[in-house]
Amino acid sequence: MPKVLHLDMDSFFATVEQQSRPSLRGRSVGIAPVDSPGGTIVAASIEAKKFGVKTGTKVAEARELIPDIVILPPTPNKYRVVHRRFRSIMQEYRGICKPRSVDEIALWLEPSEWDRASEIGVDIKQRIRDEVGEWLSSSVGIGPNWLLAKTACSIRKPDGLLEITEGNRRDILAELDLTDLCGIAGRMAARMNLAGIRTPLDLHDMKPWELKHRLGIIGYYWHLRLNGYAIDTEDWATKTLGHSSVLPRPTASPEDLKPLLHKLCHRIARRLRQDSWLAQGLVISGSMADWGDRWVHSVKLNPTQRRDELFQTAWGLLKSRPPAAPLRKLAVTTYNLRPANPKQPSLLETDRRTHSALIGTDAVNDRWGEFTVIPAAMMGTEEVAGDAIAFGQDLRLQRETLDS
Amino acid sequence: MGPMTLADKVSVLAKFDDGKLVPIIMRWRGRRYWVQGVNLHHVENRGGDKIHYFAVSTEIGDATLSYSQDEMYWRLVETNFFE
Ligand SMILES: [Mg+2]
């Protein structure tokens, strides 16, 4: 499953002020641009929140709730500095990092990191304390797409870490209100209620056609998001397309793996062109013959759907980081897919010619079966990948489930 | 009580450590204060000048020192230990 990590600094402005002034740590602090009774609190510290002071509370009201609350003006430069520091920590991890606001950053992890997403979450939280400031607490949510990661993050605040998995997804959604989901506000929730949808779990469980009937396409999109699909543009970073194959004889030798690598890249390139995607990253992985550790390496790509480019990259990775033990299975996965725009042909004429030649090859293969026309380098590999299976998130699934 | 703001010029003994400016001792109103740690350092541009802000802990409380790169002046801009 793809992994997106969403980090949200707890009570950010107030926590940064407590970081710079240890005497305020553990005390109720409110940040208000104007310290007059009618002024509005834009951020409250974790301590103040326990007494009911929150964003939007009037200063006078906050003083009534907490007589000794400290009201401070915001210092945006300080917040920007802290933001830059925790962002640069997050940028050290393998993936695509995008700030969502001054105190929130999302990280679409590369496939090689998916197995250790929660480890990475723990690591980032600790490094922010060690390297930016010991008082800076943050919460991390992990999920198969950004929405679920963000939802997970909001549940365990402050200082939380929660991963939404296939195993706990329904239990977690059952505890939430519709408006707890980022993107569903009062009006949309009311519309959903009218359609008989009361909780996120209803959106999750209801049949897609039923949702589409009751709420239109929006209902269907919510269903997909809550079921972990990558349907929002930002989640394309975690879209993958790959093929794997079991080796007839386990081997660790790059030369022995080369023909199979060719074949896998060929199949992926074909699917990329069929579905009109460009891949921006590539992973090679394998299971060791002794069922021990997995062997995984990933690298960024210039956007491509070409077999030769995929192969050159995969081959370079394999040669420079060969597996330590014989593999019984080899997989190539492309990720961080983005739609190819066929209306915008490459400026380089040679590029365009190669592209049309490849489309031609695909047409023949479609008609006569896989590998009727194959690149010369793949000659003699027909049996090797006979049991190749497609894996990863099936990009066509979305269209299919909608049509059915 | 919250922090008090001021703009007193102060003498500061500082070191340059691995590309970083770190205040060590501050003299304010005839008393010497040891800087025990920098809790946050940030820089603001003011015209062409760069002002460095150091939120520090001293033995009697928190303070914020500012250093103007152009004027080469240190100021105590905030304390929580006003008498
Ligand atoms: Mg926050």
Image (cartoon, rainbow, N blue to C red):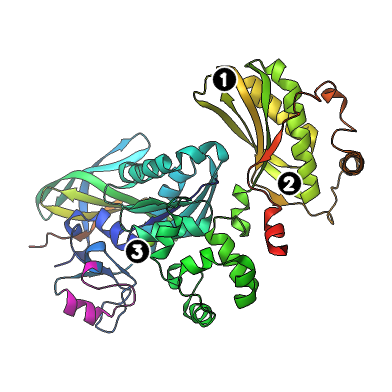
Chain ID of residue with mark 2: A
Q: Which mark is residue A278?
A: 2
Ligand 1 is within 8 Å of the C-beta of the residue at disc 3: no
**Which structural element holds mark 2?**
strand
| Residue indicated by mark 3 | A75
Q: Residue at x 52, y 83 (%)?
A: A194
Observer-side mark, 2 or 3, equals 2
Q: Residue A300 falls in which quadrant of the image?
A: top right
**B4 or A251, nearer to the observer:** A251
Place of residue A158 in the rendered image (x, y in percent of width and height, measured from the top left): 30, 57
Q: In the rendering, at what x and y percent does residue A57 appear?
A: 29, 78
Q: Label 1, on which residue?
A: A289
Does mark 1 fall on the same chain as mark 3? yes
Residue A38 screen position, x and y as percent: 28, 84
For image coordinates 22% across by 77% down, the residue present is A62
Q: Mark 2: give few (<14), some (14-19) or many (20+) Cα within 10 Å.
A: many
Q: Residue A10: which numbered mark, if any?
A: none
